[in-house]
Amino acid sequence: MSGTILHSDRGFQYTSHDYHHMLAQFGLRSSMSRRGNCLDNAPIESFFSHLKTEALQHHHIQDTEQAQILIQRYIRFYNEERLQLKLNKLTPVEYRRQHAA
């Protein structure tokens, strides 16, 4: 898991010494929104909301491997197949390609 970043808000549970110690044990880096700026977290909060409702809530996940497979499939779907109104009905990959050209 080296190089993995775990993003969270500034809730008390995410600022505790125990939490940061646990992250270090697993080789994770912490990322947090700026104080008082909820917009920093909006894109990932939106993604997690879609992930939960579109990909996970209808499954009875039995183990970490099953969760990883479902999440990986959804990330690919979200980026490569899921059309988004805010991106002019393009997928995120199509939108990035269009604006990179």
Image (cartoon, rainbow, N blue to C red):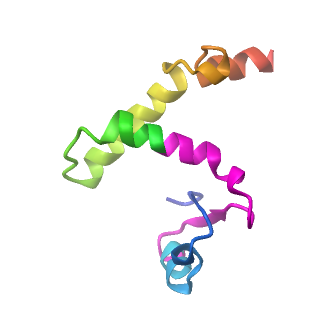
- Above or below: residue 91 compared with residue 78: above
Residue at (47, 70) in percent of width and height = 26
Residue found 54% across the figure and 75% down from its top: 24
The answer to which quarter of the image holds residue 58 is: top left
In percent of width and height, residue 40 lies at 70, 52
Q: Position of residue 41 (x, y in %)?
A: 64, 52
Measuring 65% from the left and 62% from the top, which residue is drawn there?
Answer: 31
Quadrant holding the C terminus: top right
Q: Is residue 33 magenta?
A: yes
Residue located 56% across and 57% down the image:
4
Whether 47 is drawn above or below 7: the answer is: above
Q: Is residue 46 magenta?
A: yes
Left/right of residue 46 with respect to residue 64 in the rendered view: right
**Residue 73 place in picture, x, y as percent:** 38, 32
Q: Relative to 8, is 68 on the left or the right?
A: left
Judged from this view, the residue extending furthest toward the bottom is 17
Reply above or below: 7 against 77: below
Q: Position of residue 94 (x, y in %)?
A: 64, 16
In screen coordinates, is 68 left or right of 43? left
Magenta residues span 24-48
